[in-house]
Amino acid sequence: MPAEQMVMSRELMAVLRGAVVYAIQGNHEFVTTADLLLALMDEEKLGAALQEALPRERVIETQLPDRPPKLAEDDDPTAPFPRYFSLIIRTPDGTDGRWLDSATYGMFLEGARQVDDGPYLPKHLVKGYIAESTRDYGLMPVLGANSADVQRMMNRIIDAIPA
């Protein structure tokens, strides 16, 4: 589906906003992949099954390096805030927000590429994580020693979810 026509579902927006809450609770400057995975585990259709494939404790305990998003090259040094090649997502109540870090933004973009038809759903974001974790070895520690098994299990889970 062409990116300019992409529609993000309410469920996806709820997951993204939940990830911002996790980032704030964790005192993170940016939304990390761990924040996003924790929010996906709270999602109604995916949560319980994802936690079977990937224990919540592993996500919490795995400390991934801070990966700030890339600054916009035309960024004005006199601007009141930095601009990044990323997205800023607001909390559910709109009082605060965080940028997606570079790995999380890559995961978000890859998830968008997984949408064939219809809105961008949380399951596409999981597919994005699986795809990115095969290319970005920085994401592998969360999946653990049996990462290929976890990826296969996660794929089975999301394939079983109706659109």
Image (cartoon, rainbow, N blue to C red):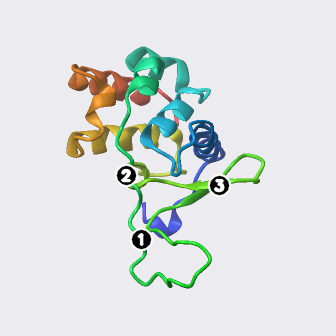
Residue linked to disc 1: 71
How far apart are the alpha carbons under marks 3 and 2?
A: 17 Å
Q: Amino acid at mark 1?
A: Leu
Image position of 156 (left or right of 21): left
Image position of 152 (left or right of 24): left
How far apart are the alpha carbons under marks 2 and 1?
A: 12 Å
Q: Amino acid at mark 2?
A: Arg
Residue linked to disc 2: 67
Q: Which of disc 2 and disc 3 is earlier in sequence?
A: 2
Residue 141: quarter of image? top left
Place of residue 19 in the rendered image (x, y in percent of width and height, measured from the top left): 57, 41
Secondary structure at numbered mark 3: strand
Residue at left offset 43%, top offset 68%: 85
| Residue placed most toward the observer, 32 or 143 | 32
Place of residue 70 in the rendered image (x, y in percent of width and height, measured from the top left): 38, 66
Q: Is label 3 in contact with label 2 (beta carbons under 8 Å)?
A: no
Secondary structure at numbered mark 1: loop
**146 versus 155 height, above or below:** above
Residue at left offset 45%, top offset 35%: 34
Q: Residues within 10 Å of mark 2 (few under 14, many from 20)?
A: some
Residue linked to disc 3: 97
Q: Amino acid at mark 3?
A: Gly
Place of residue 104 in the rendered image (x, y in percent of width and height, measured from the top left): 42, 49
Q: Residues within 10 Å of mark 1 (few under 14, many from 20)?
A: few
Residue 17: quarter of image? top right
Image position of 14 (left or right of 131): right
Image position of 26 (left or right of 2): right
Secondary structure at numbered mark 2: loop
Determine which of the numbered discs, if any, sits on residue 81 in the image.
none
